[in-house]
Image (tube, helix red, strand yellow):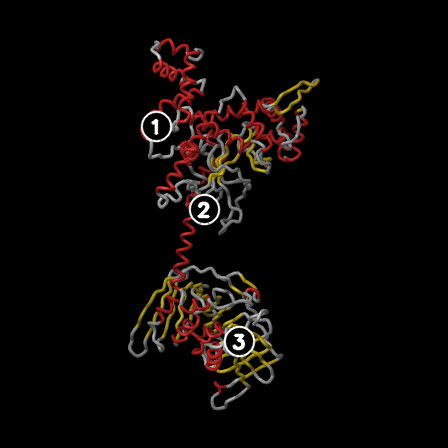
Amino acid sequence: MLEARLEQASILKKVVEAIKDLVQDCNFDCNDSGIALQAMDNSHVALVSMLLRSDAFSPFRCDRNIALGINLGSLTKVLRACQTDDILTLKAEDAPDVVNLVFENKESDRISEYDIKLMDIDQEHLGIPETEYAATVTMPAAEFQRICRDLNAISESVSIECTKEGVTFKCSGDIGSGSIQLRGHSDVEKPENNVDIDLTEPVSLTFSLKYLVNFCKASGLSAQVKLCLSNEVPLLVEYSLQDNSNSYLRFYLAPKIGDEE
Amino acid sequence: MPRTRSSKSTKPPSNEANTTSDTTPSQSTSTSSALPPSVANPPKLFVLPKSASHHRSRIVTLENPANGTPSRYLFCPDSGFYEFTRLAAPKRQPRSWLLTTENEHNVQKNMKEEEETGEDEGRGERGDGGLGSAYITRSPDLFVATPIDTLFLLLPALAPKSPKQAKQHFLSFDDHMDALTSSNRHLRALLAQHPFLRAKMEKRMAACCDTVDAGEEPMYRLSTEKLLVILVKKAERICKAGFPKSMEDQFVKPALEMPVMSVRREETSISIVSTTTTSAADEQDTIAPIVVAEAAESQSSTTTTTTTTTTTPTATPSSDSQTTALTTPEDDPPPLTTPPSIPPLLRLRTAITYLLNAYIPLTLHTPLLALLSSSPNLPSFTPLDTHLATLSKLKAQAAALRSISDNMSRKRGYDDDDEEKMAEREEKKRKREEEERRRKSESRGVRQLKKVDTSGMKKLSAFFTKVPAKK
């Protein structure tokens, strides 16, 4: 039996909104530590991993490990019926056919309830070790989104270079080329505008911009985004889901190696 | 109790020429006392002969005479060897067995006395009766033990090792047995345990071999003629009871099916008369020529019919009229009916083919088949061959006609749809539909990402190790 009450329904809404363009169906793995999700895109070059720890919910109860195989399109449809400040409760039996979602509106005493049919999803599960990255860049999520969007207009791929001077996003396409450089910067008034670069060795990697643009759909989840890079290792783009909690939404993207134009 | 079993025989042994008849090497299984969630090596269900004395019977591994692979056989000291035939449910209709005991006492009694009336199968659990000790096996395979002629098991030793090997030598029985037991350890053990088995085997060997006496000891060499006679006798016995319907449907009917020709109705009415004569004229031993000759003669002349019927087999004038009847319709449209002599011949050949494929070493196939077509005192298959040849010609014609007239609806009308193909097609269709559904449900973003050039990007599984999905 699973019962998880999430005060901010918007978190789940935004998560699903962000990943539904990357994967179609995925398993929400529920256990007593929380709700986790891992899925790859069709080409298996990108991976999304979400963890909503049990302390993000109040209360959270999960007696057995349950995998809720959900079509994200269906989930999106149902979550559209949920208002941003609603309280969301997820419920499921131990061997469920459906997952039950209840939206409570605090002001109007309106309770809406939906069931989504579950599906059996056979997914590969990858074990991702905690890695020490050569470079970690923390920056405003909106800034990262803007960079990706702007460069996407010029080229297919972007090279991200981290040196001790700062981080540079470079691209070149048919019409020409572009580059954006950011330096470390701290804003006392507005800490969400900080740019923080933590570097142990210089890194330069190339990534597909379409994928990065896709990841940026999660920008609404958090003010800051963390980019972790190491040479010849997938890029990690992390959005934290609640301030000061360990819940996160992470994207991994394989770098472009070898033949570049 | 060493294995799950039931001794109610569902089929008479003569039906061993069944459709799915590979004797798979079956593990002798053991059941544990506790009921685990899923056993790695689940018990198998056997139908053992009533007559076999179960206490002394053994499952042994012997060389399969047809292909030389080690296969399981049941050996009973009283009644000889049995082979296992696996009856499996069709792939498209997966089934399982639920094995229950009517009551535990009954089963134990069955074990001891080999008397059984019901269909209850015991799992041999010393637990409570009823469903509590029931067992579900996932595979619906049923292994039926049917007697096998010891002769077949001897063949690997007797057959030439390669098709090119020249004349074989006469060898003593012991030499032959040495050759046989060198690869069959179990057989050696059996021979040591049961001395009378030796005599039995020697008798069977004598039945299919030429013998010479060299001093005290008789020497044996395989005689293909004798073996063929035995085979044909066996095949005839299979045919005598008639084929079961499924076999009739698979082997006999489709082979003899007349293609539907929509033309030349008028001509065919003539040909019916003439062709019965052609086919019957070939069949010298049957009664048919007498009747036909009679008819032919009554057409040509006005001799009395009573005398001809008695004398026709030797009478020259009637055979003359036969040959004329035979030559004239040669160019006429072929027959639209199957002569009555054909189906039995086809059945016989099907049976012989089956026996060859199932029991006879490959090296013996060609000499046996050659002998079969040339041997005078065995049934001749020439009428069957000619009939089948005309049929295939007809069918090709019909197919050609059909492909002109209606190639839309009968696209696959000609090749026979066996179950496998149907299943495959259905599977494909299902996959396609699923794919379609997925494509429809996928969001715009997912579709967009499909167009992304991912060259130079490794799959993530190249970076991260796969772990089995947590449940």
Of the residues shown, which amino acid type is indicated by label 1?
Thr
Residue B343 in picture, x, y percent from top left: 42, 27
Amino acid type at mark 3: Val
- Kindly indicate whether the residue at mark 1 contacts the one at mark 3 (C-beta within 8 angstroms): no
Q: Which element is circle 2 on?
A: strand
Whether pointer 2 and pointer 1 mark residues with C-beta atoms closer than 8 Å, the reply is: no
Mark 2 → mark 3, Cα distance in angstroms: 59 Å
Give the CA distance from mark 2 to mark 1: 59 Å
Q: Nearer the viewer, residue B440 or A29?
A: B440
Q: Which mark is residue A158?
A: 3
10 Å neighbourhood of mark 1: few (<14), some, or many (≥20)?
some
Mark 3 falls within which chain?
A: A
Looking at the image, is A142 positioned above or below residue B385?
below
Measuring 35% from the left and 43% from the top, which residue is drawn there? B406
**Residue B169 picture location, percent across and down:** 68, 25
Left or right: A24, with A83 as reference point:
right
Where on the picture, by quarter, is residue B105? top left
**In this rendering, the label closer to the viewer, 2 or 3:** 3
Residue pictured at 46% horizontal, 63% vertical:
A65
